[in-house]
Image: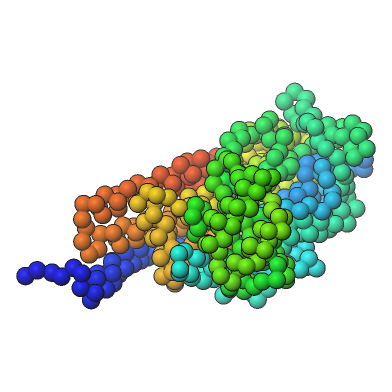
Amino acid sequence: MSHNFTNPLFLFLAMDYMFIFGSVIASSLVLVLFLYGSVSNKRKSSDPSATTHAQSIKTSENGTWTPPEVSEGCDDIIIVGAGVAGAALAFTLGKDGRRVHVIERDLNEQDRIVGELLQPGGYLKLIELGLEDCVDEIDAQQVFGYALYKDEKNTKLSYPLEKFSSDISGKSFHNGRFIQRMRAKASSLPNVKLEQGTVTSLLEENGIVKGVHYKTKSGEELTAKAPLTIVCDGCFSNLRRSLCDPKVDLPSYFVGLILENCNLPYANHGHVILGDPSPILFYPISSTEIRCLVDVPGQKLPSLGNGDMARYLKTVVAPQVPSELHDSFIATVEKGNIRSMPNRSMPASPYPTPGALLMGDAFNMRHPLTGGGMTVALSDIVLLRDLLRPLRDLHDSTALCKYLESFYTLRKPVASTINTLAGALYKVFCASPDPARKEMRQACFDYLRLGGVFSQGPIALLSGLNPRPLSLVLHFFAVAIYGVGRLLVPFPSPTRMWIGARLISGASGIIFPIIKAEGVRQMFFPVTVPAYYRTPPVNLQN
């Protein structure tokens, strides 16, 4: 009996089986993830030792925080840079009673094309720091999820916000306005000094950082001293080399435009177009403006000056833009207000240095595709605040340095999950002529379209609401196995089996190098790292 493989009914049933088989395999992995989460939550609720290190710190007999006494005429902490990390840190430490001296190169409002989308997990950290009003009065927009586009199809992916109050969401805004609000709030504290100046070098004595050398706005060369210097001078930091091993990768550039007088297909959602050669992003930054970020792979951009960039945007990018935004996109390109910025990634590889600490993009960067940078920075600030709260005195630099090694370990599960997700998603979302990479990209899109736990899990990771490393790995390989299942059903031909094997191999080649760079032990098994158990030095509490 012969089979008619061209029969439409036969092909329809084959496609059904393919999706069912892939779904069953992916469902099995997600079931493992669900069971793991249940066990993990039970352990947390029943085992006192599961409480985080930072939460276990008590600062007085009744467990409440009282600010340290401030010595007249000296700074407790110098912060280099007043961007998102520096300004938020200045307010946080100043509110806790520290005398803080912030030195920022330019205190004017900046016009940047990144740092404009704060994920819900980051907004919760902003609330925890008492800075939630910094998104008020800047025409910030609520963001409730993403719309994902590929070819002629699209799907809406909502943040899992059911358990939160109605004001909890992502927030999108002009980066400069947001930072100015935080700077104003920090400088409103009497013990926080915000000064415009350029830090030229760290002041070191016998291997201990004692402060900084800097030039004031008027050009005067001065020295500032403090027991602890925190460097937050951003992705172009000129101070990081003495405090870490900077392995900076530059996978692509973002080309930024602002679209006006148009509406997004899905209101209050970010839009990700899986374009060729790489993703295109749209999201609101005010009630009348939509930010467009076009990812251009490689380390060389088409020239802005001779019109190559405009031609690239019109001929390559514009045909892939949703129809609702197409005309506005073309009009914006013709106006010529086109900006660009390199996308950098850099795993955290600090040199523990007495008297100094790195934070923000100066310390750790990831591809901005997922908008996770501010969430990582604010999470780090909450952690550092809790670690410093028991300390009345910061002058024993060696003891303080050894104690703060715990910061590098405790931050890893959250930060590394967001970093790894950003790097892995970027590689999966980029177009490729390789059949296995094409299958992985399509499998990712179709996996998210399945809805339920298949979309909620990855979006919970992306939003920073559930940044668990194991959840990330399980969902990533669930996508890969889902893709293999679609290839093998209904007929596992040698070609399809070979592509499936290469798909698994390619998925491993994407995620494992990122995890290795982040640190397997610190990311998945932080409790096995001795620094995890560091307690506040007794001599610094008195």
Q: Is residue 437 at all visible to an observer of this figure?
A: yes
The quadrant in which the C terminus is found is top right
Q: Residue at x 66, y 58 (%)?
A: 333
When the figure is inspected, residue 179 is found, relative to residue 327, above or below; the finding is above
- Which quadrant holds residue 541? top right
Q: Is residue 406 at all visible to an observer of this figure?
A: no
Q: Which residue is at the front of the view, 129 or 123? A: 123
When the figure is inspected, residue 458 is found, relative to residue 501, above or below; the finding is below
Q: Residue furthest left?
A: 1
Q: Residue at x 47, y 64 (%)?
A: 150
Q: Residue at x 42, y 50 (%)?
A: 432
Counting from the top left corner in percent of width and height, residue 373 is at 63, 52
Q: Residue at x 91, y 34 (%)?
A: 219
Counting from the top left corner in percent of width and height, residue 318 is at 57, 60
Q: Viewed as shown, does residue 460 lie left or right of 538? A: left
Counting from the top left corner in percent of width and height, residue 294 is at 59, 55
